[in-house]
Image (cartoon, helix red, strand yellow):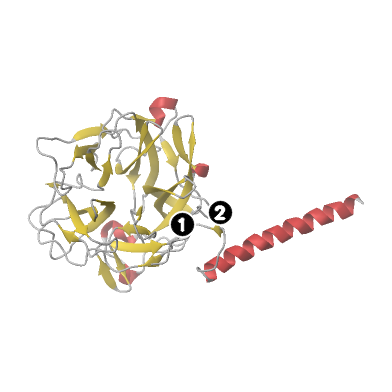
């Protein structure tokens, strides 16, 4: 009797596994099939520094750093999804280079897009044609796919890669329009934007809100910090940021978090608050190296999901004919984890890129256009 019972349980377990595996396989082969399961990566192509936004048409749009797509350079990549899991490529969001940008070897990094005042505003980084270093810039479009048109001049330029990774945020408490960016071994900064959102507010200065930690500890992810992303939840502003080395042979990257009662600080890191060694909430595992530069989006059940890039240890490099050079020889693809809130802090579920099959985010069916 006991043996038959064990056999029955085993049969049920195998049936459940086969059902889940079948549903997942159907998703991979037919993205339009209704299913509730997915597995990382959600966009298995070179797609660094992803920003996810939801547009008025009900679709989610993902924007990423430049890449060679089907043999052609895209300045700003765009992909679209109705469920946050199945993504389709769109055309270059910034097809025309700004007049001030480098004309010979243009580089465009880490776009952030927001919809407000009836327009889509895209903040990004680019190298100018008049000096060394990088600039913060903004372009505007009527549609989430663009084409985005640059404002005609940079927001701010400087040496090295200080002016990178912009993220626009409207403070729900004060109504101020803010821009975060940085850092090039400097602190992450924030400054108020003007009403037109294409320049900084008059008589304002940038404020340093979180600082690098300069020591030789091999586990120090905060030696260089970048990729700021801010959310507001239950009285706290959560600042996600990444460090320390995104790419190359010595890639050493992870997502960290800090929080504040004010959008402009003072921010307290997870390590400072808890006594932990680091403020890391998402770090590497055996399959995925250097996860980071994240964005956060909510599903229709109010659950938050963190999207980020990571390097597959089994498929690390970009194909030769798509290699842009520099740190763009590694293939950074898009993954997602659910976020968990606990004791006033936020964590990525599992603390590392999810390897197992998971349930979809809850998304209401998009209305047909």
- Residue at 45% across / 52% down in the picture? 336
Q: What element carries label 2?
A: strand
Query: Relative to residue 243, is residue 23 drawn left or right?
Result: right
What is the residue that sits farthest to the left in this orientation? 130
Using a 10 Å C-alpha cutoff, classify the residue at mark 1 as few (fewer than 14 neighbours), some (14 to 19) or many (20 or more): some
The residue nearer to you, when weighing 354 against 260, is 260
Rendered residue at 63%/65% (across/down)? 22
Residue 275 visible within the image: no
Asked if residue 112 shows in the view, the reply is: yes
Residue 179 found in image quarter? top left
Q: Nearer the viewer, residue 306 or 317?
A: 306
- Position of residue 120 relative to residue 219, above or below, is below
| Disc on res. 359 | 2
Query: Where, quadrant-wise, is the C terminus in this rendering?
Result: bottom left
The kind of secondary structure element at disc 1 is: loop
Relative image position of residue 190 (x, y in whole percent): 22, 38
Which residue is painted at 32% across and 61% down in the image? 329
Mark 1 → mark 2, Cα distance in angstroms: 24 Å
């Amino acid at each position: 009797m006991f043996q038959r019972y064990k056999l029955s349980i085993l049969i049920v377990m195998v049936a459940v596994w086969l059902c889940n595996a079948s549903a997942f396989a159907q998703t991979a082969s037919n993205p339009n099939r209704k299913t509730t399961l997915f597995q990382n990566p959600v966009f298995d192509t070179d797609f660094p520094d992803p920003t996810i936004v939801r547009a008025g048409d009900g679709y989610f749009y993902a924007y990423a750093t430049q890449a060679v797509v089907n043999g052609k350079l895209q300045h700003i990549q765009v992909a679209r999804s109705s469920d946050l899991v199945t993504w389709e490529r769109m055309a270059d969001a910034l097809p025309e280079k700004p007049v001030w940008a480098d004309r010979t070897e243009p580089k465009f990094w880490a776009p952030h897009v927001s919809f407000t005042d009836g327009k889509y505003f895209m903040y990004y980084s680019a190298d100018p044609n008049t000096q060394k270093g990088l600039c913060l810039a903004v372009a505007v479009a009527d549609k989430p796919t663009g084409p985005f048109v640059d404002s005609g001049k940079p927001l701010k330029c400087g040496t090295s890669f200080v002016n990178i990774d912009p993220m626009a945020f409207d403070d729900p408490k004060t109504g101020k329009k803010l821009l975060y960016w940085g850092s090039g071994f400097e602190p992450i900064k924030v400054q108020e934007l003007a009403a037109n959102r294409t320049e900084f507010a008059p008589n304002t200065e940038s404020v340093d809100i979180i600082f690098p930690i300069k020591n030789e500890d091999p586990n120090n992810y905060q030696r260089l910090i970048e990729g700021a992303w801010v959310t507001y939840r239950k009285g706290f502003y959560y600042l996600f940021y990444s460090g320390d080395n995104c790419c190359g042979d010595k890639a050493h990257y992870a997502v960290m978090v800090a929080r504040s009662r004010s959008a402009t600080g003072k921010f307290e890191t997870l390590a400072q608050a808890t006594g932990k060694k680091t403020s890391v909430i998402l770090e590497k595992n055996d399959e995925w190296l250097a996860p980071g530069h994240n964005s956060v989006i909510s599903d229709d059940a109010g659950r938050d999901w963190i999207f980020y890039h990571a390097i597959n240890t089994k498929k690390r490099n970009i194909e030769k004919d798509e290699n842009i050079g520099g740190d763009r020889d590694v293939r950074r693809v898009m993954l997602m984890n659910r976020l968990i809130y606990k004791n006033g802090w936020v964590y990525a579920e599992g603390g590392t890129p999810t390897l197992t099959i998971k349930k979809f985010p809850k998304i209401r069916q998009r209305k047909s256009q």
